[in-house]
């Protein structure tokens, strides 16, 4: 099974900061990597597909990069509405797996 | 409006059974793979199971294999998961989600239904 490891598990940053979250796969997953934003009491929302494709309606301050094993989600200028937990997820083979999550807090 | 609405959650004793349902609307349900994803209290997201649009291809997480059965009714636009031999560690919010296979993403989610396994 492919394991997904995210870091950091939590981060605290100020409005306007550039924020980077890393996701590492236990083996190559090509670009079969998605990123989600999850807020308490709400359903998760997909931000990025195929490692770097911004989903429709997602603000352009979000971007994704990477291929193979290491991937990053970047928020170019952190906004108050970005307070949430972020997850990566692979779609290389079954079983599908999510990373452990990164909780982003606003200072 | 595209929508997924889960129902059927509740409190069940360890070893018991429960069937959770998901009603879909606003998209061509029979064409799309569907999944269950859960989140235990204080934990992250965990993929549980996926069924193809036709129902012919089914996949399970090792943690539920042999105990959970996913199924669908394309005429009624409904997704199900039959959960047997429930354990305390199955306690979670269960989300129904569409798996968009060309991009490998869960692009439509319900609001979830809570399953609590406790004596």
Image (cartoon, coloured by chain):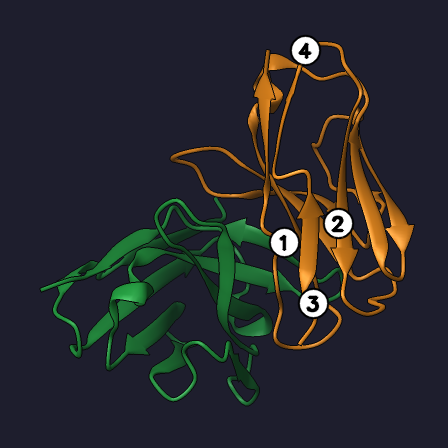
Rounded to the nearest whole Å, what is the CA distance between mark 4 and mark 1?
Answer: 24 Å
**Residue at 25% in and 81% down:** B84
Q: Which mark is residue B101?
A: 3
Q: Which mark is residue A99?
A: 1
Position in image of residue A59 (x %, y %): 73, 26
B78 or A38, nearer to the observer: A38
Rounded to the nearest whole Å, what is the CA distance between mark 3 and mark 4?
Answer: 36 Å
Provide the chain ID for the residue under circle 1: A
Rounded to the nearest whole Å, what is the CA distance between mark 1 and mark 3?
Answer: 19 Å
Provide the chain ID for the residue under circle 4: A
Q: Are marks 1 and 2 in contact (CB under 8 Å)?
A: yes
Q: Which residue is mark 4?
A: A14
Chain A representation colour = orange
Q: Which mark is residue B110?
A: none
Position in image of residue A62 (x %, y %): 77, 30
Q: Is residue B43 above or below residue B78?
A: above
């Amino acid at each position: 099974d492919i394991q997904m490891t995210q870091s950091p598990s939590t981060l605290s940053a100020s409005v306007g900061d550039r924020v980077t979250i890393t996701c590492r796969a236990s083996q190559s997953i090509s670009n079969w990597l998605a990123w989600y934003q999850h807020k308490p009491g709400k359903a998760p929302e997909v931000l990025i597909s195929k490692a770097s494709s911004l989903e429709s309606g997602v603000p352009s301050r979000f971007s994704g990069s990477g291929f193979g094993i290491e991937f990053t989600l970047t928020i170019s200028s952190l906004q108050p509405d970005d307070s949430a937990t972020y997850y990566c997820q692979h779609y290389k083979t079954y079983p599908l797996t999510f990373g452990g999550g990164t909780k982003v807090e606003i200072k | 409006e595209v929508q997924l609405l889960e129902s059927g959650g509740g409190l069940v004793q360890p070893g018991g059974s429960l069937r959770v349902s998901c009603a879909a609307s606003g998209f061509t349900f029979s064409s799309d793979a569907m999944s269950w994803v859960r989140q235990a209290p204080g934990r992250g997201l965990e993929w549980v199971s996926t069924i193809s649009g036709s129902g012919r291809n089914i996949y399970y997480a090792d943690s539920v294999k042999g105990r959970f059965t996913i199924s669908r009714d394309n005429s009624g636009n409904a997704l199900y998961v039959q959960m047997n031999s429930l354990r305390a560690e199955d306690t979670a919010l269960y989300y129904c989600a569409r798996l968009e296979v060309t991009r490998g993403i869960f692009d439509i989610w319900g609001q979830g239904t809570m399953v609590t396994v406790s004596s």
